[in-house]
Every structure is written in C-alpha cells, then in structure tokens.
C-alpha cells in the first residue's frame, strides 16, 4: 500500500509553530477534510489562547473539532487535549472517545480520504505521522524532525536507525513537512536525512 493519501481534498494550517530552547512548545496543526476537523499535537504552548484564538480566526470553535491526533505521548504534544471536548483521540494503537477504547493500528489508518496515519518510530517507538493530501501536495505532520535543520541526530530518540528509516519514508511522500517543534518547511539539502 502506498503511503500517499487517496484524496487531495484536505486543507491544513499551523495554528502555532513550536520551539525548543527558552521553553518548549509543540507545533499544533489543524486539518480539514470533509466532516473531519482534526487537531494535531495540542501540547505545551505559552498560552492556550494561541491554539483557541487561531482556531477561532479560522472560523471554528473547540467544540467543532472531531478528532485529535497525538504524534506520540510526550506531554509537550498532548497537554492541551482536553480543550476539545467532543473529539475522538488517536494514537499509535487506538481511538478514544469518552469512555470507549477502540483498538486499531495507526499504520495506514484513514481519518478521511485525504488524511492518513503511518507509523514512524524513532523519537519514540510509538511515533506516528499524519499525512495530509492537499491540492498543493502532501503535508506531513511529524516528529521525525524537530525543526527544518536540527537536530541531525535526535538526542532523545529511542532508536536512531528507526528514526533514519522513518525520515526516508516521510521524505518519499511529503512535499512539505510540519515538524514537532518548528515552522513548516519544504525538504531540501539542509534537511537531516535528505538524499536529493
């Protein structure tokens, strides 16, 4: 099966770009495909208003969010999940909603025709990437990179070889990468793992 999402009808927005250094914040994304309105990695940010105000500027309320995707379970990517009271929550092995827990593997799972999850271990053994098919190409929301240029080797990676393989997998399909702690970027020569 190809990693490329079947559809090209989604839109996506970075609600707030993350950073590491003088504080830590995750990059928080919003994806829309039909009836699916998904937040990716609602983690640590300086203020919850950075997420909620950006969402409101796009015409949505927290109650409109149907799905939340965690790239992995570290608090800096999950801390603000409760902002979305009506959402289903997705991780590497299940979907959670209210008091239900539905087992499913994230590998190849489609939230919508233009939104696919794939396993991309390395930073943790359970990392997943959200691939978003848009009219401009495929966007990858992922933690296989922290930013566009750093670090070459993830100092917290559980498996550097798996990380390198996951980077190659994402680069094979992504036209734009939205990293775990930085601005979106187009992969190129300075991207760790890029082979041209």
Image (cartoon, helix red, strand yellow):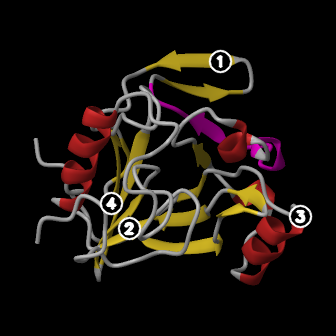
Q: Residue 6's spot in the image, x, y percent?
A: 21, 57
Query: Dot 3 corresponds to which residue?
Result: 47
Q: Which mark is residue 46?
A: none
Residue stretch in magenta: 81-92
* Quarter location, residue 15: bottom right
Q: Residues within 10 Å of mark 1 (few under 14, many from 20)?
A: few
151 relative position to 8: left or right: right
Task: Let me know if residue 17 is in the magenta part.
Answer: no
- In the picture, the quarter occupied by the C terminus is bottom left
Task: Let me know if residue 89 is in the magenta part.
Answer: yes
Q: Nearer the viewer, mark 2 or mark 1?
A: 2
First in sequence: mark 2 or mark 4? Answer: 4
Marks 2/4: CA–CA distance: 16 Å
- In the picture, the quarter occupied by the N terminus is top left
First in sequence: mark 3 or mark 4? Answer: 3
Q: Residue 192's spot in the image, x, y percent?
A: 30, 61
First in sequence: mark 1 or mark 3? Answer: 3
Q: Residue 12's spot in the image, x, y percent?
A: 49, 72
Query: Dot 1 corresponds to which residue?
Result: 100
Marks 1/3: CA–CA distance: 30 Å
Seen in the picture, residue 147 relative to 69 is either above or below; the reply is: below
Seen in the picture, residue 94 relative to 108 is either above or below; the reply is: above
Q: Residue 21's spot in the image, x, y percent?
A: 71, 61
Seen in the picture, residue 69 relative to 152 is either above or below; the reply is: above
Marks 4/1: CA–CA distance: 25 Å
Seen in the picture, residue 38 relative to 14 is either above or below; the reply is: above
Instruction: Please name the residue shown 40% across and 50% down the image.
Output: 144
Query: Dot 4 corresponds to which residue?
Result: 114
């Amino acid at each position: 099966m190809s990693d490329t999402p079947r559809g090209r009808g989604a839109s996506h927005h970075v609600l707030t770009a993350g950073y590491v250094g003088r504080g830590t914040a995750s990059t928080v994304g919003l994806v829309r495909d039909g009836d699916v309105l998904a937040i990716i990695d609602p983690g640590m940010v300086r203020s919850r208003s950075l997420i909620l105000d950006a969402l409101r500027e796009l015409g949505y309320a927290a109650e409109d969010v149907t799905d939340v995707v965690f790239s992995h379970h570290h608090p800096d990517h999950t801390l603000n999940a409760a902002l979305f009271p009506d959402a289903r929550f997705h991780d590497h092995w299940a979907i959670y909603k209210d008091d239900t827990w539905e087992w499913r593997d994230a590998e190849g799972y489609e939230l919508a025709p233009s939104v696919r999850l794939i396993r991309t271990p390395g930073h943790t053994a359970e990392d997943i990437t959200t691939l978003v098919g848009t009219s401009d190409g495929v966007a990858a929301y992922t933690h296989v990179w922290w930013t566009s240029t750093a670090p070459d080797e993830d100092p917290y990676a559980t498996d550097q070889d798996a990380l390198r393989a996951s980077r190659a997998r994402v680069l094979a399909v992504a036209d734009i990468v939205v990293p775990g702690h930085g601005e979106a970027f187009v992969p190129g020569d300075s991207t760790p793992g890029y082979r041209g």
